Amino acid sequence: MIKDITIGQFFPGESFVHKLDPRAKILILIVFIVVLFICRNFFSLLLMLVFSFTAVILSRISPKMIWKSMKAIVVLVIFTALLQLIYNDKGDVWWKPFPNGSFVITSGGVYGAIFLIVRIITLILLTSLLTYTTSSTLLTDAIEKLLTPLKWLHVPVHSLAMMMTIALRFIPTLLREIDIIMSAQKARGAKLDTGNLGQRIKALVSVFVPLLVSSFRRAAELATAMECRCYTDGAHRTRLRRMRLGWRDWLAGGVLLLVSATAVFTSFYPIGSTLIFQAVIS
Amino acid sequence: MNKKELISFQNVSFSYETDTENPKTVLQDISFSVMEGEFLCILGHNGSGKSTVAKLSNALLLPDQGRILVDGVDTGDEEQQIEIRKKIGIVFQNPDNQIVASIVEEDVAFGPENLCLPREEIRSRVDAALKAVDMYDRRFHETHRLSGGQKQRVSIAGMIAMRPKCIFFDEPTAMLDPKGRRSILNTIHRLNREYGITVVYITHFMDEAAEADRVMLLSDGRILKTGTPSEVFTQTDLIVRCGLELPDPAKLSFELSELGIRLTPGVLTEQDFIDAFQRFMKESQ
């Protein structure tokens, strides 16, 4: 169950998306998210969906992995969609369950719910691609590069980046450890899957205390090992890989700018007023 | 051939300051040296102070009394500590806690990157190190998907890539299955023979010590005996006092001698035992 969590995992490959410069990937993702939240109708949303869908296909990541990252947020998606359905009272009334009209389902609510679901799916598609196709070292190198201006403000950019590399590296290790501790506690009669919410939370304490203790031990050992490998402050380290912007990065960036410009333009100046152009989020 | 002293411990004492009133003494006045190019095995049970020896050698810890010289440089000299760590590497027991990056070759590059080497030099060192431990084919694999033995190989490659003169192995096989243990031990022996890296191998498995050049028996922070494996292993009472277990062939010949069947002393490996037993049969006929 816990092994299903795929946050921050990397699947090595040789695809177009894998070969993009990690800095370009991060910038593209930021622009994409901003534009996605500017989108106001189905036409612009559809453009964004096509963009992230193309990226997924180009990355050759198996649909199973993408589905796994989706599964983690299914509850959130359903919840926000329901809220939209219930509280949005714009548009025509489609269903009126109570005669006094205290609760109605409107066209605005239905469109709004669909709109939100598609928006979140679009978002998850592209964000999960970032860590799926970029190794943690490259990712943090890129973040370090992009945050370089902060060094002028004496922000320890390198140390932050190193912390992130290690955090990503230890996610699978700690997940496996949680699995082992849970089995060990179950073998001793702990009831982790039964009882009401309060009881379950209390039972989880018996999992997280050992996890915390062992994490501290791991951290101490890792620090010693890093010292043995001559890690000091790290500000002057050289790198195995060089990051270089290539034609792929300019191409991907160019396509994104085109898509974004169209999406933003049609959001404010819808062409015609058919269903797909209908502004549902106001 | 007159070999050079690489590391020399001179009357070293060390204690952990867990609480100030009764500090736990780990090493008491020990002196020994590690010769360039040799395979030294430090044998001792848990808490005998064997891991502390490794950490003292590359200035992770400093001795309370006495001094430690690495290539003639005192480990207490703070300005030389990085130089000392370049010469003396340590591979620890748990590979999970010494791998820094998620991809094999990126982890191996971590050390050379810290040494601020040029990119081409890092690349060639990483490739050479991965080939030396037979992990070159898996250089793009994710570290967390490897088996315990493969992870330990990556840790060893990470150390080799820094081109140290000497590597301490602190119970590198303790968390591995028998097959993984054997292959890691073979790799370490090959590094010693073919690459001329001085090896200090710390363990409590006696059978792993059988092929070392020299064995040092450590118990409660004191050196009980130093010598060739057969010199040390024949001191059966000493080994039992250390709380160690003899390798099976040695144990068998020891138990046979108590029954009056005296084989030639110095039996360590299965082949030794077969030879000694055949000799015994011939003589008794």
Image (cartoon, coloured by chain):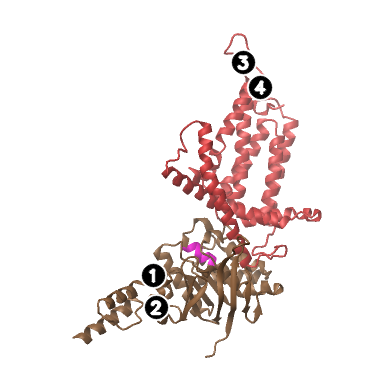
Chain colours: A red, B brown
Q: Amino acid at mark 1?
A: Glu
Q: In the image, B249: left or right of A61?
A: left
Tell me residue A49's x, y (percent): 62, 38
Q: Residue placed farthest to the top in the image?
A: A99
Residue B151 magenta: yes
Q: Which residue is mark 3?
A: A103
Inter-mark Cα distance, 1 to 2: 10 Å
Inter-mark Cα distance, 4 to 1: 76 Å
Inter-mark Cα distance, 4 to 3: 10 Å
Q: Which mark is residue A281?
A: none
Q: Are marks 2 and 4 on the same chain?
A: no
Q: Which residue is mark 4?
A: A88
The answer to whether A208 is drawn above or below residue B38 in the figure is: above
Q: Residue placed farthest to the right in the image?
A: A152
Q: Which residue is mark 1?
A: B245
Eye-nearest disc, 4 or 1: 1
Q: Which mark is residue B233?
A: 2
Q: Residue at x 54, y 60 (%)?
A: B140
Q: Residue at x 66, y 50 (%)?
A: A25
Inter-mark Cα distance, 2 to 4: 84 Å
Which residues lie in the magenta part?
Answer: B149-155
